[in-house]
Image (cartoon, rainbow, N blue to C red):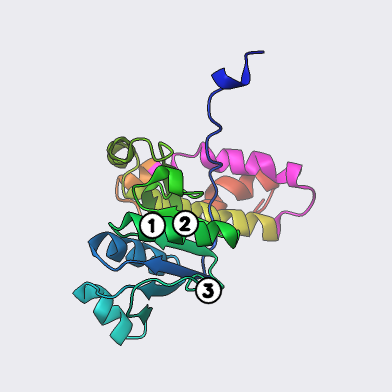
Amino acid sequence: MGHSASRKPIPPCPLYVDLRGALVTVVGAGRVAERKIEMLLGHGARVRVVAPACTAAVEDAAAAGTVELVRRAYERGDLSGSFLVICATDDSAVNEAVYAEAIANSQFVNVVDVPDKCNVIIPSVLRRGCLQIAVSTGGAAPSVARDIRRSLEEQFDESWEAYIDVLGELRTLIKQRVPGPAAARKPLYEAIAAGGLRERIAAGEQLDAERIYGELVAPLVGEGC
């Protein structure tokens, strides 16, 4: 075993968090904050924005009631009740104060582009419907994470969205129709995974769960005999 000084830093634990209905406070309302707000709304969060000025898009969201806008500079106490805090300002004193309050409140906090003021890293994400592939360098090289994510876009094309959807529907059908322990269903899931469905979808074939169940699953469980 080496000395503690030579040990590598412990990387963040990757998690997918359900933000539906959770309050997220965003401090700052410039272009960077605007992108974060759009991402948070897409995941169902309730967003509170604290900023003395904001972009037109944030202004429109506030007017529509999509976000709560507190139109002033950050003050201690603004983070109360928040599950997650994102600070996107170019004011180091504000960044430090927001981070300090969030840590004192035991909240998740991300100060954009300041890795040592984050206990949460927001990764670069490739999305294909329910499929999400997140790439992070722990804040060390965000541009590298983006480059890796872009390279993955070529490997995981749009066909993956429909493929994952039909797999989810098939899994539900199997759980409903095939009784017994989970081990009894495992070979059925493996047969579906080996069935070339993604390639068929990529070739333009329209597949539905009932049809695939009849093709791949029913013969294995003795249905229709």
Does the magenta portion include 57?
A: no
Residue 192 inside the magenta-drawn segment: yes
Disc number placed over residue 95 in the picture, else none: 1
Q: What residue type is labelled 2?
A: Tyr
The magenta segment: 177-198
Q: Where's residue 133, x and y in %?
A: 43, 45
Q: Name the residue under label 3.
A: 21
Picture coordinates of residue 132, whole percent (x, y): 43, 49
Q: Name the residue under label 2.
A: 99
* Mark positioned earlier in the residue sequence (3 or 2): 3
Quadrant of the image occupied by residue 69: bottom left
Tag 3: residue type?
A: Gly
Residue at left offset 28%, top offset 65%: 34
Say the numbered circle drawn on residue 42. none
Image location (x, y in percent) of residue 154 = 28, 39
Other residues around mark 3 within 10 Å, as few (<14) / some (14–19) / many (≥20): few
